[in-house]
Amino acid sequence: MRYQPVSSSLFTKNREKFMKRMQPKSLAVFNANDIYPIGADSTMPFEQDRNLYYLSGVDQEESILVLFPDAADKKHREVLFVRETNEHIAVWEGEKLNKSTAYKTSGVKTVYWLKDFETVFHGLMAQADTIYINTNEHYRAAHETQTREDRFNKWVKENYPAHKVAKSNPILQHLRSVKEPEELEVMQHACRITEKGFKRVLEFVRPGVMEYEIEAEFMHEFLSNRSRGFAYTPIVASGRNATVLHYIENKNQCKEDELILLDVGAEYANYASDMSRVVPVNGRFTDRQKAIYNAVKRVKDKATKLLVPGAYWKSYHEEVGDLMTDELLNLGLLDKADVKGQNPDWPAYKKYFMHGTSHHTGLDTHDYGLLHEPIEANQVFTVEPAIYLPNEGFGIRLEDDVVVQEKGEPQNLMRDIPIDIEEIEDIMNN
């Protein structure tokens, strides 16, 4: 891969944490993602299953990880299966993992070729009572495409019907949400790449540029810094497009008096960054734009301080809603009658700020995390309040990625990315 190798010690720690939570006499299996076809002989770029990567660091198709802490033979307590490579594959597809490099990447000492999987697996299942299957139960997940993991889960239930089935997901939802120092270092690096892209764009934006040209400037900087590209589909939304929450066409021309909402983030080593900034096309905010911008920033700064260990997701968002309500009252966008008669299930502020303030981020942009559990130190959240004004032709959303601390305010991984109006204007005009 183009990114610098991540130490195998991280993946060893992650496996140890997972196996401590497994039931006695149980094993867990994690499959690589498919390479998905487009048409003819074309395929989509490969993206690794995040759980397999989290536990092994293996970023290659047709790979399987088996964890069996109670295996009779110690060498089978962690087993990695990779596709057998040869000189022909190296010439046509590039270098693949061999048994030695698979061990170096993952820290898993026992590595077999994939063709041996069913034989080895059958012997291990004879010792096990329970199998953990890997399912995607993220609260935002809504996929119709059958995955390699789906096919394996179906196969194992049909061929081993006497075994109990457990789910890996509840364990991973918690483990993945609390980051190790090595993960935070990788995420910080992704944010630094995003910073470089944003500063490049600040010097590029001018009246007449196309939204997709701005997207291209980000991509140039990301690729130049060993990123695979965007961590998610980028939003480059000028003018009224910024009031469409998931505007991704990026096709319009940026006009003189408009603002541009940028929601972009670089990926690095499969970890995401997630940033939102707003910039004026002509390099100067109007007084009205400044008033809305600073109101959103005040909410963001105050909301960030609420992300502390022990806080609960629901209460946090209620408190942020109160902060936003105060700002909207001060701006004259709401009045006291709006607030007094509001529907508690859809408060008055939702007219202008209709989405959540924060989400977990990490290996996925919307990362794993159990929302009913209290917030913990070393969890990473976005903070992204907004005010959308379709009738005025602009929207403001400001977003940083922050790490919850054991004590004190969260650490902002995007602290060096310009956000103050004065700094943005200075860079754009100088």
Image (cartoon, rainbow, N blue to C red):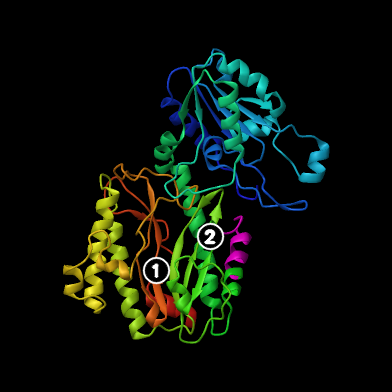
How far from the left and from the top, in percent, is residue 21?
A: 41, 27
Bin the neighbour count of mark 1 within 10 Å (Cα to Cα): few under 14, some 14-19, many 20 and up.
Answer: many
Closest to the observer, 355 or 100: 355
Q: Residue at x 45, y 51 (%)?
A: 366
Q: How many marks?
A: 2
Viewer-closest of 156 and 4:
156
| Left or right placement of residue 136 versus residue 341 in this view | right
Magenta extent: 217-230
Q: Position of residue 81 (x, y in %)?
A: 65, 29
Vertical comparison of 24 with 87: above or below: above
Is residue 254 found inside the magenta-colored segment of the image?
Answer: no
What SS does tag 1 mark? strand
Write down the residue under mark 2.
193
Please identify the quarter of the rendering in which residue 114 is found.
top right
* Contact between labelled residues 1 and 2, with CB atoms less than 8 Å apart: no
Position of residue 122 in the picture relative to residue 323 (left or right): right
Q: Earlier in the sequence, mark 2 or mark 1?
A: 2
Residue at x 51% of width, y 62% of height: 194
Residue type pointed to by label 1: Arg
In screen coordinates, is 311 left or right of 242? Answer: left
**Is 8 in front, or is 262?**
262
